Image (cartoon, rainbow, N blue to C red):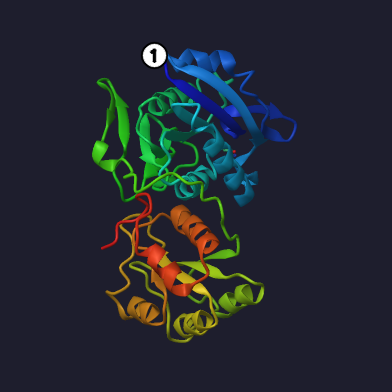
């Protein structure tokens, strides 16, 4: 029996047309229907318009709406494909991974570097891969791009122009398409840990701070005074930060004592943090910072938002970060 796949369109380059102010999303699933059917194979497609946005204009409330819409439809479809702009796609796929934990069907997010209306675009290949994965019967939230399927919480946009725009960071691909067809790496599939329940609450009061030598520690207090509750610090190397001259560590200690949450990771894209190794990291742990290990920056900031939407209790927040909810982190 043919599988039922829901295609939800949020916009992005895949659905873009050239206009006076540059490329802008404008194609509906209806106008893309012919192309979508070409790549659908046996699948029975249903189209749903969600938005028509460049993904720079996607906000946390859109993640919650998207999660709600998918949750409502999950009983009627074997899989869902979300068409999304590539620029913030990895934030959306990370947040959906948390909000839709234990979902019973595949939810596959894709986009492209060129519009589907361009005859040399990557759009058809990416959609083909996404629609195929959506029929796989493997539940979870995934990103399909350039003939690879990645965990939604591990994907990151690493190239701004190439068709190979996304990599799975610190984690193997879930599937790849080659001349032998789609090969699913079953070890990498998310493990279902319970019954599905939509968990769409989040707290947007999160700041991301990328350290640089000479950065003033007052920056942290400025954010805190504006009401930011949690910080993701992209620290140096294995997760180090200064405690001489610009003493970030004592600033962090005092903000944590006043109820702020600090998650500390690394600026290095690959291999993650290990704050215990150097004094510059260990002191941050002693001050009460939580370690991000090998999470992507997208997975880290969205996890902070999501966790703060579940609890405000500092101990419970810490416990969430000692767990991998959907494969987003390897804790060493
Ligand atoms: N600016 C576009 C977007 O993110 C880029 C793309 O889709 O590739 O919506």
On screen, residue 293 versus residue 27, left or right, reads left
**Which residue is at the front of the view, 19 or 140?**
140
- What is the tally of numbered marks visible in this picture? 1
Residue 105 position by quadrant: top left
Residue drawn 33% across the image and 60% down it: 272
Q: Is residue 189 left or right of residue 215?
A: left
Quadrant that contains the C terminus: bottom left
Disc 1 on helix, strand or loop?
loop
- Residue 95 in percent (x, y) is at 50, 49
Residue 275 makes an appearance in the image: yes
Q: Position of residue 83 (x, y in %)?
A: 54, 32
- Residue 84 in view: no
What residue sits 65% from the left and 45% below the top?
Answer: 57
Task: Pick the quarter of the image with the N terminus.
Answer: top left
* Residue at the spot of label 1: 1
- Note whether 150 is above or below 331 in the view shown: above
Q: Is mark 1 within 8 Å of ligand 1?
A: no
- Nearer-the-camera pick, 273 or 94: 94
- In this picture, is 93 found above or below 107? below
Say left or right for 182 vs 299: left
Q: For the point 24% across and 41% down, which residue is it?
A: 187
């Amino acid at each position: 029996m043919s599988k039922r796949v829901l295609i939800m369109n949020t916009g992005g380059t895949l659905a873009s047309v050239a206009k006076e102010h540059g490329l802008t999303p404008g194609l509906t699933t209806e106008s893309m229907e012919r192309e979508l059917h070409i790549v659908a194979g046996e699948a029975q497609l249903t189209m749903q318009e969600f938005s028509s946005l460049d993904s720079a204009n996607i906000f946390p409330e859109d993640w919650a709406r998207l999660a709600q819409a998918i949750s409502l439809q999950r009983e009627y479809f074997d899989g869902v494909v979300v068409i999304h702009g590539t620029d913030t796609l990895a934030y959306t796929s990370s947040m959906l991974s948390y909000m839709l934990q234990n979902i019973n069907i595949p939810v596959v997010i894709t986009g492209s570097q060129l519009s589907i209306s361009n005859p040399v675009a990557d759009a058809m290949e990416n959609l083909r891969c996404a629609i195929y994965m959506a029929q796989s019967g493997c539940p979870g939230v995934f990103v399909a791009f350039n003939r690879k399927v990645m965990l939604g919480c591990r994907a990151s946009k690493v190239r701004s122009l190439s068709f190979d725009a996304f990599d799975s960071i610190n984690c193997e691909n879930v599937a790849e398409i080659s001349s032998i067809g789609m090969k699913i790496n079953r070890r990498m599939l998310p493990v279902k840990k319970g019954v599905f329940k939509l968990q769409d609450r989040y707290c947007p009061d999160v700041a991301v701070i990328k350290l640089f030598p000479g950065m003033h520690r007052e920056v942290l207090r400025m954010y805190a005074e504006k009401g930011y509750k949690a910080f993701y610090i992209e620290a140096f190397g294995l997760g180090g930060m200064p405690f001489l001259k610009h003493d970030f560590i004592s600033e962090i200690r005092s903000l944590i004592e006043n109820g702020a949450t600090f998650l500390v990771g690394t600026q290095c894209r690959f291999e993650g943090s290990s704050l215990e190794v150097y004094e510059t990291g260990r002191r941050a742990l002693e001050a009460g910072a939580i370690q991000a290990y090998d999470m992507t920056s997208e997975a880290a900031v969205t996890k902070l938002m999501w966790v703060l939407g579940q609890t405000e209790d500092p101990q419970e927040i810490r416990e969430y970060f000692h767990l991998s909810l959907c494969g987003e982190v390897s804790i060493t």
